[in-house]
Image (cartoon, rainbow, N blue to C red):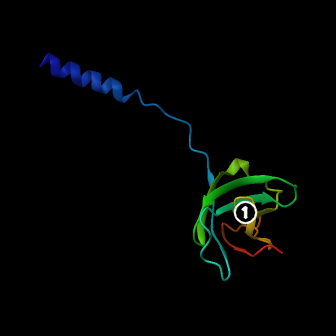
Amino acid sequence: MLRILTVLLFSLVLTGCVTVGESQPKLVSITGVAGAEGVSLLPKGAELTVAIIDAKVRGAILAQKHFTVAKLPVLFKFQLPEKAIDPDADYLVVAMVKLEDRLLLQSYERFPVISNGERVVTVTMERPR
């Protein structure tokens, strides 16, 4: 009986020892699809790069992902900490497909996200001009 009471008392004490971690940062999700009209199959080893950039600042990349792909379209998703988002930025999603160092496809149009409230985007790529 003493052993049972000791175990119960010890269990009660341990329930008060809960570790409270920091709250998870609030995330902004950007999802989309990258494709090209009339192109579905790609050469072996083709690599798709999708990036979120700030159009106001040359070379400013908020996030970037690389995929080795054989077929288009490709779904993508970014999850960014809300505190990393600059409210004054003009964010765009850009994409390109390369095979080794040769550019096969890239986006030329502007595909705005975040700044305009959009969280879902369809990026259309074209052959190099």
**Within 10 Å of the Cα at label 1, are there few (<14), some (14-19), or many (20+) other Cα atoms?**
many
- Above or below residue 102? Residue 37 is below
Give x and y (percent) for residue 96.
72, 65
Front residue of 64 and 5? 64
> In which quadrant of the rendered view does residue 55 lie?
bottom right
Q: Residue at x 87, y 55 (%)?
A: 57
Q: Residue at x 79, y 56 (%)?
A: 87
According to the picture, the residue beneath numbered tag 1 turns out to be 114
- Above or below residue 120? Residue 83 is above
Q: Residue at x 16, y 18 (%)?
A: 3
> In which quadrant of the rendered view does residue 30 lie?
bottom right
> In which quadrant of the rendered view does residue 115 lie?
bottom right
Q: Where does the C terminus fall, quadrant-wise?
A: bottom right
Q: Residue at x 60, y 63 (%)?
A: 76
At numbered mark 1, what does the secondary structure look like: helix, strand or loop? loop
User: Which amino acid is tagged 1?
Assistant: Ile
Give x and y (percent) for residue 53.
78, 58
Give x and y (percent) for residue 56.
88, 59
Give x and y (percent) for residue 114.
72, 62
